Amino acid sequence: MKNTTEQAAPAKKRLTTSAMIASIAGEGQPTRPAPFGHALAALARERQDLVGLTADLGKYTDMHLFAKEFPERFFQMGMAEQLLMSAAAGMAREGFVPFATTYAVFASRRAYDFICMAIAEEDLNVKIVCALPGLTTGYGPSHQATDDIAIFRAMPNLMVIDPCDAHELEQAVPAIAAHRGPVYMRLLRGNVPLVLDRYGYCFEIGKAKTLTSGNEVLVISTGLMTMRALEAAEQLRADGVEVSVLHVPTIKPLDEATILAEARKPGRLVVTAENHSRIGGLGEAVATLLMLNGVTPTFRQIALPDAFLDAGALPTLHDRYGISTEAVCSQIKSWL
């Protein structure tokens, strides 16, 4: 007979993984809610020419904040990205400054021809702001825009911007609104990490900026990978490895002068880091720039593989595909 005084061993906590885990913020990391939505609404109070459009994704691109405050200037186009882009083009022709939001996969793959013919070829003043860039969702290839920069870099007239955090998004909104011409900007939505404020950073269109200095490694990064590069630089410093981080938020046009000046400094491993396929993104843009200018440091890429990625929880996927802080540290160490 079982001894009734014996206590049962505590059950082990079951570890689970879920595609619903979609935050890129680390535990305890400061965040700011819906920086794009709040910044757009604030700017619209000053500018009557701003209008907002979305393709049934107002809540999931933070456009709902603009819609609530300015319902007469908000247009819900339904699940029809081609119509969304065409309507935005028409509004731009009438003198408005449309901000059109959807998911990055739908803009780049589904509405490409409409953006090209209706907006970019005509050089219209449309701002296309798209959520779920790269590997920022666990819902698999149907929602992971791992090729959007490659697609849009090749489109004439179209500026391409990949902000790092909430601080930069808040500054980028008025900057792209003031810029005359079409813009594609990747969007981090929801509770977005707050990172760059600690570095006295100020966003400028077309400008790359050095955030940390180090004489062993130069990381040229964009988007959320600048956050990962900064975290990795801090960890590597504890191991005696000095890392310089150059943040490049504007992928097109590229700040060639700053990148070349940094890459020419002797004796440093040069690494590009991006939340995008290694095909056609920042890494290839920088490699081409360096080769054409005769700059030949040891060069490596941190990027997503040329593959359709798995579904699952983001922390798991970021480790698997090499864009977590720990993975960045490990790769850099292996190259030194």
Image (cartoon, rainbow, N blue to C red):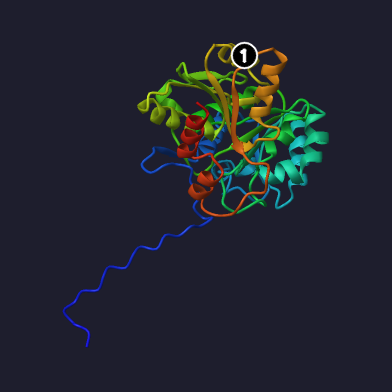
Is the residue 239 above or below the residue 84 in the image?
above
Percent x, y of residue 234: 39, 28
Does the image show residue 42?
no
- Label 1's element? helix
Q: Residue furthest left?
A: 5
Q: Residue at x 51, y 37 (%)?
A: 38
Left or right of 167 on screen, residue 286: right
Is the residue 197 above or below the residue 213 in the image?
below
Q: Residue at x 58, y 41 (%)?
A: 70
Q: Which residue is mark 1?
A: 260
Percent x, y of residue 255: 63, 17
Give the amino acid type for the residue marked by disc 1 in the picture.
Answer: Leu
Q: Nearer the viewer, residue 1 or 137?
A: 1
Quarter of the image where one finds residue 173: top right
Q: Nearer the viewer, residue 267 or 302?
A: 267
Percent x, y of residue 125: 72, 28
Does the image show residue 305?
yes
Q: Nearer the viewer, residue 110 or 224?
A: 224
Within 10 angstroms of label 1, few (less than 14), some, or many (20 or more) residues? some
Q: Quadrant of the N terminus?
A: bottom left
What is the number of callouts on the image? Answer: 1
Percent x, y of residue 224: 53, 35
Q: Nearer the viewer, residue 95 or 132?
A: 132
Quarter of the image where one finds residue 41: top right
